[in-house]
């Protein structure tokens, strides 16, 4: 079965940093694009970042560009999200998901992990 | 303010048909980019429901169907069941943002 497990969330002060991890199993990770999406408490989904299988192509949402960095380690079947300069509005449940579809403009996401909670507060 | 607009809520009695709209613009749905739909049951992660406008992944009941026309897309649920109570999100690509975008989500209530 295809499976994603996020970790690394927690409580951090404004201006702090956190690194999220997402471990994959059940599919050939090195051939799949990956994304991060977040969901603030009681709110909808927000796409954050995309990384191609080779890490050659990376995209970010404007809301996190310059503060968040996506990366991956195909040998460890993991994707990461380095989050710096965190703000209260970054408080959310962070999901990773596998990308499906032939190219970025047609991509959809399946499966999703269960999420890891990030709380930014003093 | 989401790039894709969905009604906050829809409701229906068991067995009825409900539809959820997803309205975009000429930089996303209107440009021909595919629309995908996700179901999020309470307290769980989103699950893919429809991909490529109207395709159902294996295991998704045929009560769920998707369509697209112009700058809008729709998700229809026929024969509504209590287990369909959830939040539903549309997703597409936006060329002006160079990234994926989601609708604000629609809560479906079974009366």
Image (spheres, rainbow, N blue to C red):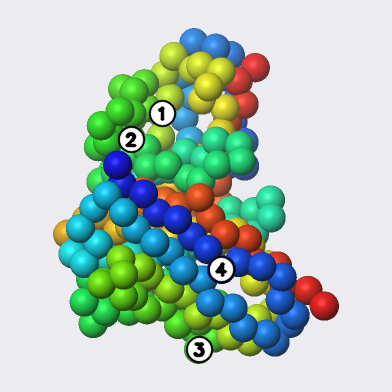
**Marking on residue B66:** 2
Q: Is residue A50 left or right of residue A119?
A: left
A115 relative to A59, above or below: above
Q: Which residue position holds label 1?
A: B76
Chain of the residue under label 1: B
Q: Residue B93 placed where, x, y %?
A: 34, 62
Q: Residue B73 placed where, x, y %?
A: 37, 43
Q: Which residue position holds label 3?
A: A66
Q: How much space separates mark 2 and mark 1, taking CA atoms?
A: 6 Å
Chain of the residue under label 2: B
The reply to whether residue B67 is visible in this rendering is no
Disc 3 crowd, CA 10 A, few/some/many (<14, 14-19, 20+): few
- Quarter occupied by residue A58: bottom left
Q: Residue at x 21, y 67 (%)?
A: A30
Badge 2 vs badge 1, beta-carbon distance below 8 Å: yes
Badge 3 vs badge 4, beta-carbon distance below 8 Å: no
The tag earlier along the polypeptide, 2 or 1, is 2
Q: Secondary structure at mark 2?
A: strand
Q: Residue at x 43, y 73 (%)?
A: A80
The reply to whether residue B8 is visible in this rendering is yes
Q: Which residue position holds label 4?
A: A8
Q: Are marks 1 and 4 on the same chain?
A: no
Q: How much space separates mark 1 and mark 3, taking CA atoms?
A: 39 Å
């Amino acid at each position: 079965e295809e499976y994603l497990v996020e970790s690394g969330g927690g409580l951090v002060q404004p201006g702090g940093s956190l690194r999220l991890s997402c471990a994959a199993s059940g599919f050939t990770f090195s051939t799949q694009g990956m994304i991060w999406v977040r969901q603030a408490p009681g709110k909808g989904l927000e796409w954050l970042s995309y990384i191609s299988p080779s890490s050659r192509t990376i995209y970010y949402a404007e809301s996190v560009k310059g503060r968040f960095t996506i990366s991956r380690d195909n040998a460890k079947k993991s994707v990461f999200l380095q989050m710096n300069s965190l703000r209260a509005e970054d408080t959310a449940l962070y999901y990773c998901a596998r990308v499906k579809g032939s190219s970025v403009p047609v991509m959809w996401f399946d499966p999703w992990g269960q999420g890891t909670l990030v709380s930014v507060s003093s | 303010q989401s790039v894709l607009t969905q009604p906050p809520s829809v409701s229906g009695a068991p067995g009825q048909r409900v539809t959820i709209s997803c309205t975009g613009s000429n930089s996303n749905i209107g440009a021909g980019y595919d629309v995908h739909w996700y179901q999020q049951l309470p307290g769980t992660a989103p699950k893919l429901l429809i991909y490529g406008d109207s395709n159902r992944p294996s295991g998704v009941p045929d009560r769920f169907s998707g369509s697209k026309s112009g700058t809008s897309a729709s998700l229809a649920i026929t024969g509504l069941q209590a287990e369909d109570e959830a939040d539903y999100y549309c997703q597409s690509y936006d060329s002006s943002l160079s990234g994926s975008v989601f609708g604000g989500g629609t809560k479906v209530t079974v009366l």
